[in-house]
Amino acid sequence: MPKKGKGKAKNSVNKAKHTKLMNQKINKVKLEKQLNKERLKAIIKKVNDAKKDEE
């Protein structure tokens, strides 16, 4: 049975830490994907510009 009004919630600290860490991980992955897309776009633009210059 759950506690009735005394003390703090049992797992709230661990859940908060876990949520914080998972959000950091998710944000890191999103940022890496975004940077990778930007790099690829820059490379593609450079190659296309080079092709136009050759013609």
Image: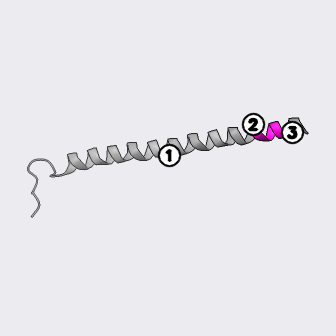
How far across and how far down the image is residue 20, in percent? 33, 44
- Marks 3 and 1 sit apart, C-alpha to C-alpha, by 33 Å
How far across and how far down the image is residue 6, in percent? 8, 50
- Determine contact: label 1, label 2, CB under 8 Å: no
The numbered mark, 2 or 3, whose residue comes first in the sequence reads: 2
Write the start and end of the magenta stretch as one range.
46-51
Which of discs 3 and 1 lies nearer the camera? The answer is 3
Q: 42 or 47, which lies in front?
A: 47
Q: In which quarter of the image is the N terminus?
A: bottom left
Dominant secondary-structure state across the stretch colored magenta: helix
Occupied quadrant, residue 44: top right
Task: Kindly state the secondary structure of the residue where label 2 is placed.
Answer: helix
Outermost residue, bottom direction?
1
How far across and how far down the image is residue 54, in percent? 88, 37
Q: Crowding near pointer 3: few (<14 within 10 Å), some, many (20+)?
A: few
Task: Identify the amino acid type marked 1.
Answer: Lys
Residue that badge 2 annotates: 46
